[in-house]
Amino acid sequence: MSEAVLILGATSAIARATAAAFAARGDALYLASRDEDELRRIAADIHLRYGVVVHHGLFDAEETDTHEAFFKSVVTAIPNLSGVLLAFGYLGDQLEARDFSVGERVIACNFTGAASILSHCANYFELQKRGFIIGISSVAGDRGRQSNYVYGAAKGALSLYLQGLRNRLYASGVRVITVKPGFVDTAMTFGLPGMFLVASPKDIGDRIVLSLGKSADVVYLPWFWRYIMFVIKHIPEPIFKRMKL
């Protein structure tokens, strides 16, 4: 049975790949981001390739006062909305983010804006007693590291928020999945030093959709990041604080 899925941050590389994976199985889509021209191009391409219904609309994660009206417009366009993929994020520059005027935007986009829109999604699905929420967090949120602790803190907060939603919505039959990618070949990570074991957006997108058919609540992508982060999380703090990660 096909779904109808809202994709937030639909112009990102991972979101595009995941949208294609949803469309390939016949799901209707609502694509949302801040770039209307790019949204229009992506929507037309997916409709042409897969023949599914594709809506699109403007959405800004940082403009939280618009989120309620935006979500109402989505469920008006797709009354049978059955799932949400939260795929937006902002890495920023860690050195610049030491100035909170810059770091505040990293937090606003990756956590505050996410918590805002997901609150509306969660309330809707809880009343429907069905549906799913997939939130793309990051392995960066598993432990604070000097190289990206502002971004990591925001993603760590998102992971905890999704965990709480999962606990709250379980009794209503609503699935909440936390996806934690490692390094992915996207515009956001292009040129960053220290990249290794880099995954393709298509592989990540395909596996996000496949996760709906499995039981895991927290999904590391690719799978081996679960073990990499297990090791990193268990390095004793007296040793870890001396490391340059």
Image (spheres, helix red, strand yellow):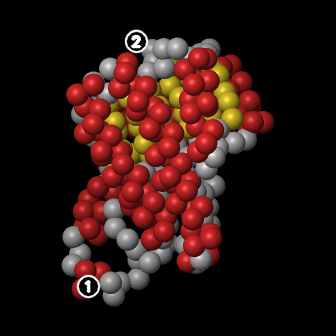
Instruction: Label 1, secondary structure: give it.
Output: helix
Side of 15 where 203 appears, left or right: left
Nearest to N terminus: mark 1 or mark 2: 2
Tell me the number on the disc at residue 239: 1
Q: Position of residue 60 (x, y in %)?
A: 64, 44
Residue 181: horizontal and vertical position, in percent? 42, 52
Instruction: Name which quarter of the figure residue 138 lies in.
Output: bottom left
Residue most toward the top?
1
| Quadrant into which the C terminus falls | bottom left
Residue 44's place in the image compared with 179, above or below, is above
Residue 117: x %, y % from top left: 51, 39
Q: Amino acid at mark 2?
A: Met
Element type where label 2 sits in the image:
loop
Q: Which residue type does callout 1 highlight?
A: Ile
Place of residue 16 in the rendered image (x, y in percent of width and height, measured from the top left): 59, 37
Identify the residue under disc 2. Answer: 1
